[in-house]
Image (cartoon, rainbow, N blue to C red):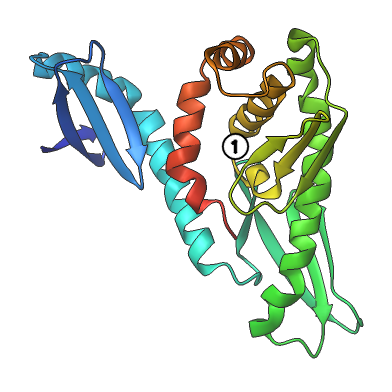
């Protein structure tokens, strides 16, 4: 059932579902659409008050989805576009100069690139996408190597190696030799999602399966892993540039 709440000057449409098995109100943002699930027979005023309290979070999720959608569909690596890193978007500035090869860097809060004078704007993506991807791989690896410490101390185990690469269907993996492999695209997502994938793979150092013991280990590392897993399921297809 389609409903709407008013938050300041902003109208927020949402789809309302009632569930006989649910005991609390649930809110999810799926593909830019707000889904609200309430226990059957819940008082309308009660859940609307909770929705209003959650409105800033809902609007933030909607804005994040829209930014990902626009970026993933139209990014051509031209000046003024925004590139994602760890869930935030940074403006790109491109200059044409008398150089033989393009360069790419992050400087003073924005991405900067230099392309050869003869390069047309239609070719910018071909020139700069590989450089951006390599930047993400290098920065992501250093970030993950520092971030992983918060989990290894609790787990009591450390991976033999950590690397970042292209992966077709997985966000990460753990080899029998204890190597952690991460998909470079996870570093386009918010830090909380990087933490989820790190914890998910690290738990395999203790349990190389998906038995209950594995899920208990993951929950010990990340009590809210189920919410993060669901976010990645719903939004992972948008993590492209």
Residue 178 image position (x, y, % from top left): 81, 28
Residue 132 image position (x, y, % from top left): 75, 60
Horizontal relation, residue 65 to residue 39: left or right = right
Q: Residue at x 50, y 38 (%)?
A: 232
Q: Residue at x 31, y 20 (%)?
A: 53
Residue 235 image position (x, y, % from top left): 46, 44
Between 165 and 9, the residue placed more toward the observer is 165
Residue 125 image position (x, y, % from top left): 68, 74
Residue 27 visible to an observer of this rendering: yes
Between 201 and 134, the residue placed more toward the observer is 201
Horizontal relation, residue 148 to residue 90: left or right = right
Q: Which residue is mark 1?
A: 190
SS at mark 1?
loop
Q: Residue at x 64, y 84 (%)?
A: 122
Q: Is residue 136 above or below residue 78?
A: above
Residue at the bottom extreme of this rendering: 118
**Disc 1 crowd, CA 10 A, few/some/many (<14, 14-19, 20+):** some
Residue 108 visible to an observer of this rendering: no
The quadrant of the rendering that contains the N terminus is top left
Horizontal relation, residue 239 to residue 206: left or right = left
């Amino acid at each position: 059932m389609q409903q709407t709440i008013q938050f300041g000057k902003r109208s927020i449409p949402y789809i309302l579902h009632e569930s006989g098995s649910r005991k609390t109100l649930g809110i999810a943002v799926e593909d830019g659409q707000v889904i609200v699930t309430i226990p059957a027979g819940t008082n309308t005023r009660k859940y609307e008050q909770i929705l209003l309290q959650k409105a800033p979070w809902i609007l933030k999720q909607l804005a994040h989805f829209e930014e990902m959608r626009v970026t993933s569909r139209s990014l051509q690596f031209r000046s003024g576009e925004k590139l994602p890193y760890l869930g935030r978007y940074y403006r790109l500035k491109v200059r044409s100069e008398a150089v033989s090869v393009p360069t790419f860097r992050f400087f003073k809060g924005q991405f900067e690139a230099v392309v050869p004078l003869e390069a047309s704007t239609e070719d910018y993506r071909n020139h700069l996408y590989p450089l951006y991807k390599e930047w993400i791989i290098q920065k992501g690896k250093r970030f993950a190597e520092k971030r992983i410490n918060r989990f290894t101390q609790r787990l009591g185990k450390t991976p033999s190696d950590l690397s970042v690469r292209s992966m077709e269907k997985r966000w990460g993996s753990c080899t029998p030799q204890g190597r952690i492999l991460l998909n470079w695209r996870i570093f386009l997502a918010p830090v909380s999602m990087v933490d989820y994938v790190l914890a998910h793979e690290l738990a395999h150092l203790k349990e190389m399966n998906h038995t209950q013991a594995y899920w208990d280990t993951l929950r010990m590392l990340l009590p809210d892993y189920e919410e993060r897993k669901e976010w990645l399921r719903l939004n992972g297809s948008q993590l492209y540039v």
